């Protein structure tokens, strides 16, 4: 079956712009988590959604937001982009919230470059 | 936030067993230990998880000490393709069970 699909794979934005990233989970998976990965900070948890509700949130400013739709697809948005937002954004899906099922399935990520 | 500590890097000869340690001394009785790995430029990949019994699957074995304060991931016959960063994670159920990745162990398998 198809894996986790993230779009776009690569994108370039300039400071001050906003960006929306999309994630389509594995069919049947209702939980979606988002992570930011940078060389300096590693993999950092952004938020987790389950059945359209935000279940967990990491320590990121309010410029980072997300949502989940009734078909479990998820989007995350970053407004007023800063240079430090350049990163690989990873989405992961699971049947139930990640900590309860043991297995997160990750997509290949969306690589954002902010100039 | 990570509740686990791992050595930053390790080397292993191809064909030999790779034993990756993880300390999770503050883990609670009902919290599982999960292992993931990330090959360069790819999303992390689930390997295995366990509670208190040793576990084995087609990828690896997980040995958890009786007091549950540490565990070891064993790749029985490491190959060059096993070169990756390996993450040991113990989700905090008091914080909703979110999976927090630490810095992991960078395993280099050498010919």
Image (cartoon, helix red, strand yellow):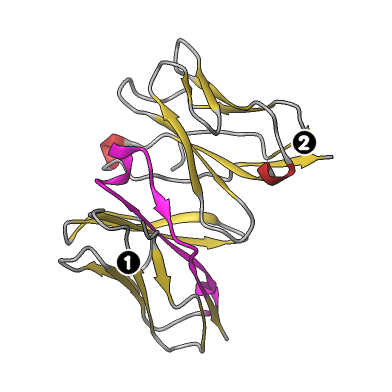
Residue A92 located within the stretch drawn in magenta: yes
Q: Quadrant of the N terminus of chain A?
A: bottom left
Q: Which residue is mark 2?
A: B11
Q: Quadrant of the C terminus of chain A?
A: bottom right
Disc 1: CA contacts within 10 A as few (<14), some (14-19) or many (>=20):
many
Residue at the outermost front position: A1
Rate crowding at label 2 as few (under 14), some (14 to 19) or many (20 or more) other CA atoms within 10 Å: few
Circle 1 residue = A24
In the image, what residue occupies the spot 74% across and 43% down? B80
Q: Which mark is residue B64?
A: none
Which of A95 and B91 lies nearest the eye of the viewer? A95
- Write down the chain letter for disc 1: A
Question: What's the CA distance linking mark 2 and mark 1?
Answer: 36 Å
Q: Position of residue A36 (x, y in %)?
A: 47, 62
Q: Is residue A96 left or right of B7 when viewed as pictured? A: left
Q: Is residue A68 above or below residue B107?
A: below
Q: Based on the picture, tell me whether residue B16 belongs to the magenta stretch.
A: no
Residue at 42% across, 34% down: B90
- Between marks 2 and 1 in the image, the one whose residue lies nearer the viewer: 1
User: Of B104 and A32, which appears nearest the observer?
Assistant: A32
Question: Which stretch appears magenta?
Answer: A83-111
Residue B70 image offset from top left, x and y in percent: 52, 21
Q: Quadrant of residue B9?
A: top right
Q: Position of residue A102 (x, y in %)?
A: 36, 38
Relative to residue A2, is residue A55 drawn left or right? Answer: left
Name the secondary structure under disc 2.
strand
């Amino acid at each position: 079956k198809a894996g986790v699909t993230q779009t776009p794979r690569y994108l370039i934005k300039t400071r001050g712009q906003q960006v929306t990233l999309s994630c389509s989970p594995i069919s049947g998976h209702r939980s979606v988590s988002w992570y930011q990965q940078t060389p300096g900070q590693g993999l950092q948890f952004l938020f987790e959604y389950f059945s359209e509700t935000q279940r967990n949130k990491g320590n990121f400013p309010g410029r980072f937001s997300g949502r989940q739709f009734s078909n479990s697809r998820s989007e995350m948005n970053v407004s007023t982009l800063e240079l430090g937002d350049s990163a690989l954004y990873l989405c992961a899906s699971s049947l139930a919230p990640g900590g309860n099922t043991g297995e997160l399935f990750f997509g290949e990520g969306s690589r954002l470059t902010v100039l | 936030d990570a509740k686990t500590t791992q050595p930053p890097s390790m080397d292993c000869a191809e064909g030999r067993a790779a034993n990756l340690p993880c300390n999770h001394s503050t883990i609670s009785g009902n919290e599982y230990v999960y292992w993931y790995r990330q090959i360069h430029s790819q999303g992390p990949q689930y390997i295995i998880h366990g509670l208190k019994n040793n576990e084995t699957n087609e990828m690896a074995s997980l040995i958890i000490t009786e007091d549950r304060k540490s565990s070891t991931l064993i790749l029985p016959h490491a190959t060059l393709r096993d070169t990756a960063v390996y993450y040991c994670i113990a989700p905090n159920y008091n914080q909703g069970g979110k999976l927090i990745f630490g810095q992991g162990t960078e395993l280099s398998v050498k010919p």
